Image (spheres, rainbow, N blue to C red):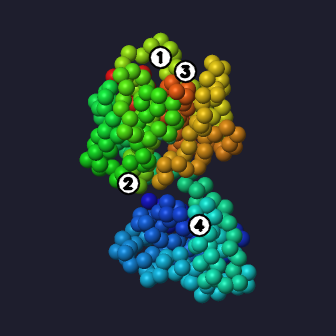
Amino acid sequence: MDHAGRLRRLQEQLRGFDAILVSHLPNIRYLCGFTGSSGVLLVFPKKAVFFTDGRYTEQAREEVKAARIVVSRKPAILAAAEFLAKQKLGRNARVGVEAEYLSLANRGRITFALGKTFRLKEAPPLVEMARMVKDEEEIERITAAVLMGASLFDTTLKTVRPGIKENEVAAEMEYVARRAGAEQMSFETIIASGKRSALPHGRASEATVPRQGFVVCDFGVILAGYCSDMTRTVYVGRPSGEARDFYEAVRAAQLAAIAAVRPGVAVGEVDQAARKFLKRIGLGRFFSHSTGHGVGLEIHERPRVAAGQTEILQAGMVITIEPGAYIPGKWGVRIEDMVLVTETGCEVLTPTSKELVAV
Ligand code: ZN
Ligand code: ZN
C-alpha cells in the first residue's frame, strides 16, 4: 500500500492547519498502515508522527512505514497532545481534529495539554474523501473479500430450512468464514426469516425459520482489512405468484440502480433510479432506507448513496446497491451487490445469481 503517497497527498491539502490529529483508526490504517486498536497520528505539513503504547511497540515497528513512531506510557492521544505542545508552531496555531471521532473527554484532555495558544478546529473529512476512491491494491483486496463473502452463500443455501434457528444459520456461515481465512465478519450477520424479513436490520435471532416465507440474508467478511457486503433473499417453501412478483420488483429496482452507476453521475441519481421504479409500481413507501453506501476499510463509508446526496461518482469508488421493500407484519426482500465504478460504467463485483431461489 502506498502509505507515503497517501500521507503526502493529505499534507498537500492541510491548508490553514498547522497539524491534523488523526484519531479514527481506519483513517490511521489508511495513512500509515497501523492495524492495531490504539494509536493516534499527527500529520504536519512536512512530517507525520504516530503515537501508540507499549502493547504495540513491535507491531508499530513492523507496520508503520511512512511516519515516525513514538511509544508512550501515556494514552496515545495525551502523548500526541504533549508532543504538539512542544512544537514551535507560533501563536494561535490551528490544530485540526476529527470531530466525528473525538470524544468530549479526549477533547478536554487535548485542550488542557495544549494550553491557550492552540486552537482546536474541526478538520474537513480529508481522509474519508481520499478513501472513497480505491487504488488497484485496494480493489484487489476488496474483490478477494467479495468472493470469499459470496462463497458463504452456499452454506446459507445448505443450512436454511424450516425449523432451524436463524442464529444457527449465521453460526454455520461464520464458522465457514473463519475456516476460509476471514479475519472476522464485517458486521453482525442478518438472517431475517418469515415476518422478521420485514425488518431491514433483522440480525439473526433465536427465531425459527418458518415453513413458508422469505429469508433475508445480509452478510460480509473482512479479509486483509477490507470489507465485503452482500444480501440475497431466498424463499423457504414454494413462492406464490405474489411473492415472486414482489421479489422481481426489488430485483428490477436493483438492476435499474446498477444501470445508473457511472462516473460523473451524482449518487442521488442512483438512489432515484431504484426509488422511482418502486414508486411507479406502488412499493415506494415500503423502501425505507437508502440505496447503498461506500465500502472499504469500513463497512459503511462515503459516499452515501441516498436521496438528495450530491457526491459525484468517480472511477475507483466501490459502493453497494441494495434497495429493498418491506411490508410490516408480512415480508421483506432486499438484494445487495458490491459495485466498482469503472472509467466507462461499472462492474458488479458480487458474482452470485439474483434469480429467486426456493429452498
Ligand atoms: Zn449488507
Ligand atoms: Zn450494505
Which mark is drawn over residue 244? 1
Circle 3: residue type: Ala
Q: Which residue position is annotated with label 4?
A: 102
Image quadrant containing the N terminus: bottom left
Quote the CA–CA distance across marks 1 and 3.
9 Å
Local packing at callout 3 (Cα closer than 10 Å; few below 14, some 14-19, many 20+) is some
Earlier residue among tags 1 and 3: 1
Quote the CA–CA distance across marks 4 and 3.
43 Å
Query: Dots 4 and 3: beta carbons under 8 Å?
Result: no
Q: Which residue position is annotated with label 2?
A: 224
Q: In this view, does 88 lie above or below 17?
A: below
Earlier residue among tags 2 and 3: 2
Q: Nearer the viewer, mark 1 or mark 2?
A: 1
Q: In this view, does 176 lie above or below 123?
A: above
SS at mark 4?
Answer: loop
Q: Nearer the viewer, residue 165 or 34?
A: 165
Circle 4: residue type: Leu
SS at mark 3?
Answer: helix
Quote the CA–CA distance across marks 1 and 2.
38 Å
SS at mark 2?
Answer: loop
Q: Nearer the viewer, mark 2 or mark 3?
A: 3
Earlier residue among tags 4 and 1: 4
SS at mark 1?
Answer: helix
Local packing at callout 1 (Cα closer than 10 Å; few below 14, some 14-19, many 20+) is few
Residue that extends furthest to the right in the rendered view of this protein: 92
Q: Which residue position is annotated with label 3?
A: 249
Local packing at callout 4 (Cα closer than 10 Å; few below 14, some 14-19, many 20+) is some
